[in-house]
Image (cartoon, rainbow, N blue to C red):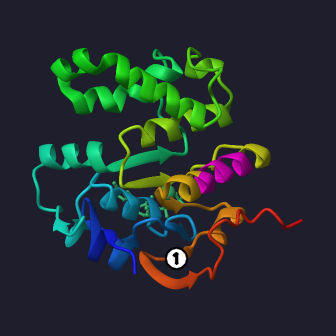
Amino acid sequence: MSTTILEARHLSKRFSMGERTIRVLNDVSLQIRAGEILVISGPSGAGKSTLLHLLGLLDRPTVGDVFLNGEDVSQLSGRRQARLRNEHIGFIFQFYHLLPELNALENVFLPRMIQSGPLRWWRKKKQIREQAQEMLVRVGLGDRMTHRPSQLSGGERQRVAVARALINEPRIALCDEPTGNLDRENSQAIQELLWDLNTSFGQTFVIVTHDEALTRSGHRNLHMVDGQIVEESVQTGASEGTGGDEE
Ligand SMILES: Nc1ncnc2c1ncn2[C@@H]1O[C@H](COP(=O)(O)OP(=O)(O)OP(=O)(O)O)[C@@H](O)[C@H]1O
Ligand SMILES: [Mg+2]
């Protein structure tokens, strides 16, 4: 049995809107294991992004706890949470969130630069640049390193975002609709890339998605409705499947 990296225990999230309280997550518990691809699907408004934000320490639960590498991290200060995020968690979002004034290479080494701090950055600059270059080659963008986001296609931008998410070698990568803004061909290419990174490097992924091709192809698939996990399915012996045989 592989180790649990990230765990949610009895998470609930409520938002107050004036007089009204909106219950968005309702007692959600789950464990994410090293090396798995966990896909979370569900209708719009089910609470998928909210859950991902809580797992990624981008927001705090109203009730419940999040454990990272066995440690309860939900009550830590914002500063300590930010540090843990930078070191252990990579994020990939639907709209890439790249910095427009930086080129692909600079976007990728930014998290590494933040992690290093100014002094180590100066000492290790060359090495870190090389690591970022390596990451870009790995995602198939060896010939696009000096392009700015506006000079890249959607699929290429998402590849930069994947490289940036993984540069600090996070234990876990959290993806919110990673193919949501891409056409079918690019969606498939991003899916193949994520699955390939999982197979080659054991990278753990949690993927929130509407994409039909993705919803059935995780090692484990969870379905959410109304702030709760209502169904879980496990793929048997399908660690390499990219769901590409439909049609
Ligand atoms: N900051 C907030 N304040 C109030 N309500 C919120 C807030 N964030 C989310 N919600 C509400 O919580 C519900 C769940 O939102 P969430 O973004 O988690 O859904 P989702 O499952 O990711 O949907 P989608 O598939 O459309 O992205 C929605 O009804 C949304 O309006
Ligand atoms: Mg969402």
Looking at the picture, which amino acid does disc 1 mark?
Answer: Leu
Q: Residues within 10 Å of mark 1 (few under 14, many from 20)?
A: many
Q: Residue at x 48, y 29 (%)?
A: 98
Q: Which residues are magenta?
A: 187-196
Q: Residue at x 50, y 37 (%)?
A: 163
**As displayed, is residue 83 above or below residue 200?**
above
Q: Quadrant of the N terminus?
A: bottom left
Q: Residue at x 39, y 60 (%)?
A: 52
**As displayed, is residue 156 above or below residue 22?**
above
Tell which of 18 and 223 is nearer to you: 223
Q: Secondary structure at mark 1?
A: strand
Residue 74's image quarter? bottom left
Answer left or right for 236 relative to 173.
right
Q: Which residue is mark 1?
A: 222
Q: Position of residue 63 (x, y in %)?
A: 20, 73
Does the magenta portion include 194? yes
Q: Seen from this angle, which residue lies furthest right?
A: 247
Residue 120's image quarter? top left
Q: Quadrant of the C terminus?
A: bottom right
Q: Position of residue 105 (x, y in %)?
A: 49, 21
Q: Position of residue 166 (x, y in %)?
A: 44, 42
